[in-house]
Amino acid sequence: MSEDFREQPHTRAQGRVGEDDGVRWLAAQGYLILERNVVNHGGEIDVVAKEDETLCFVEIKARDGKLYGDAIEAVGPGKQRRLSRAAALYVANKGLHLLACRFDVLGLDRQKEGWRYTLIRDAFPYSPGPVRRRW
């Protein structure tokens, strides 16, 4: 675990440190990291990776304490919809519609001895939500 986590000046910087540690952990678990911090009109995807022949869209959350619950609890229905939309655009733009895809969530909860990693594979189904009209 990076000791820099608590030394960061704000939560966005802490999130970046946690994400870096999470990516290293995913790679050690056999994930092939393809891209990080993919941004499109649908939203942001922390990590696009492959595990075996499955394309994985991974959301990484890091928490310093239990005040707001476990890190994985931060990926609620709204975040799932945004990830679904971003992933759908990613797949369409890259022409990857024939690949099996899933959404994984990796939670990093800080403990005295280091991070406690919680990985949930296929954490939620594709759920883009209702179409929004702009008029």
Image (spheres, rainbow, N blue to C red):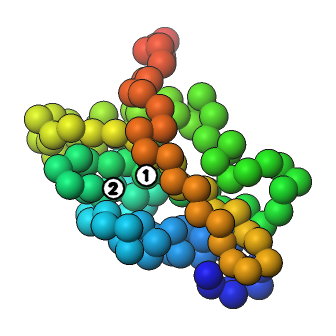
In-image side of 11 versus 100 (left or right): right
Q: Is residue 60 left or right of residue 74?
A: left
Residue at 41% x, 33% y: name it: 84
At mark 1, the secondary structure is strand
Quarter of the figure with residue 115: bottom right
* Proximity of marks 2 and 1: CB atoms separated by less than 8 Å: yes
Residue designated by label 1: 58
Measured as percent of width and height from the top left, residue 81 is found at 50, 29
Residue at the spot of label 2: 48
Q: Amino acid at mark 1?
A: Val
Residue 22 x %, y %: 51, 68
| Local SS, label 2 | strand
- Of all residues, the one furthest to the right in this rendering is 67
Tell me where residue 129 appears, x and y as whole percent. 48, 19
Q: Taking 17 as reference, is 102 above or below it?
A: above
Taking 96 as reference, is 78 above or below it?
Answer: above
Look at 17% across and 50% down and name the residue there: 53
Q: Which residue type does callout 2 highlight?
A: Val
Q: Is residue 15 visible?
A: no
| Front-lying residue, 29 or 36 | 29
Circle 2 Cα neighbour tier, 10 Å, few/some/many (<14 / 14–19 / ≥20): many
